[in-house]
Amino acid sequence: MDTNCIKLFVLAAETLNISAAGQQLGLTPSVASAWLAKLEMQVGADLFHRTTRKVTLSIAGVEFLPYAKEILAQQEAALAALGQGNTNVSGTLRFAASSTFAQRYIMPILPEFLDRYPDINLELMLSDSQVKLIEGGYDLALRNLAVEDSSLIGRRLANDTRVLCASTEYLAQYGTPTSPEQLNQHRLLVFMNTKPRKLINTKSKADFSFPPEKGKPRILCDDGASMRIGAKAGVGICMSSLWSIHTELQEGSLVRVLPDYKIDDNSAVWLVYPKSNVLTAKVRVLIDFLVEKIGDSPIWEAP
């Protein structure tokens, strides 16, 4: 199977423009169409639906696309191992991340990344809801949970220490809890679908958790930034990552609640990618860049 045809297919799938994809490879529209027709004969399926108005991927094309990218990645890795191939890092990288984390730490440093690697284009899927990495065709994702999926490989970026917090106004109005039992008497702001996490204290052997297993949180939310804003406004007590609220803790708009208790979990900020994928140059340079800018000494862990 001709990898040049596969490269053309991937470009055409990304642009949905066969002529433009061919132009990137120095091909005339007729030659580009002929190359794709040759590839379709080899795979035994139509990869595109073509009309006079537009080009779309067929079901077979959607299914073939990740394998096509894998073939090109394998070729790139093999040439790199032999000291050959294109030394310029290029291509489109699909990256999924928490929108809350991206707003604070990734978007501000993107200009430097784009300047370093002018031939890399980014497709960003930013949501605090966890996306399906393989099914979505993502090259890399940032997650705030321990990697439990055996089909993924994880690179730990930084610690993800979580604390209970609230605004001083809320605590002045409703009181400051001095023990976990008192949390049931407060308005709790909880991230949606959060599993209870143990609260531990070396001086106490009692078993507590947040959110408490008894009772129901007053407010559920699926957006970390909105939770931070709500907590500052006095909505209630919430559990937040230090990376999300460290600025508010420093300025005093949020304060720790039950600071003698530790949230016992193994959460960290991870960069993950499918185990089946070769770690391509474009993915490697983004991982290295994020580790350099964020992971070496995270600002939220500074004293």
Image (cartoon, grey):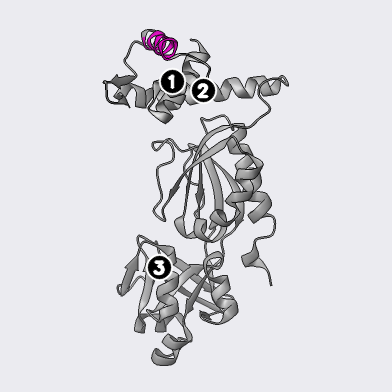
Q: Residue at x 57, y 37 (%)?
A: 120
Q: Earlier in the sequence, mark 2 or mark 3?
A: 2
Q: Earlier in the sequence, mark 1 or mark 2?
A: 1
The amino acid marked with disc number 3 is Ser
Secondary structure category for the residue under label 3: helix
Q: Residue at x 45, y 65 (%)?
A: 197
Q: CA distance from mark 2 to mark 3?
A: 43 Å
Q: Position of residue 2 (x, y in %)?
A: 50, 10
Residue occupied by mark 3: 226
The amino acid marked with disc number 1 is Phe
Question: Which marked residue is nearer to the observer: mark 1 or mark 3?
Answer: 1
Is 53 covered by the magenta stretch? no
Quarter of the C terminus within the rendering: bottom right
Q: Position of residue 192 (x, y in %)?
A: 35, 62
140 relative to 214 in the view: left or right? right
Secondary structure category for the residue under label 2: helix
Residue occupied by mark 1: 9
Q: Position of residue 170 (x, y in %)?
A: 42, 86
Image: 288 above or below 264:
above
The amino acid marked with disc number 2 is Gln
Checking the image for residue 24, the label placed there is: 2
Residue placed most toward the observer, 197 or 46: 46
Q: Residue at x 69, y 59 (%)?
A: 297
Secondary structure category for the residue under label 1: helix
Q: Are marks 2 and 3 in contact (CB under 8 Å)?
A: no
Give the residues in magenta.
29-40
* Image quadrant where residue 183 sits: bottom left
Image: 277 above or below 222:
above
Residue placed most toward the observer, 203 or 199: 199
Tag count in the figure?
3
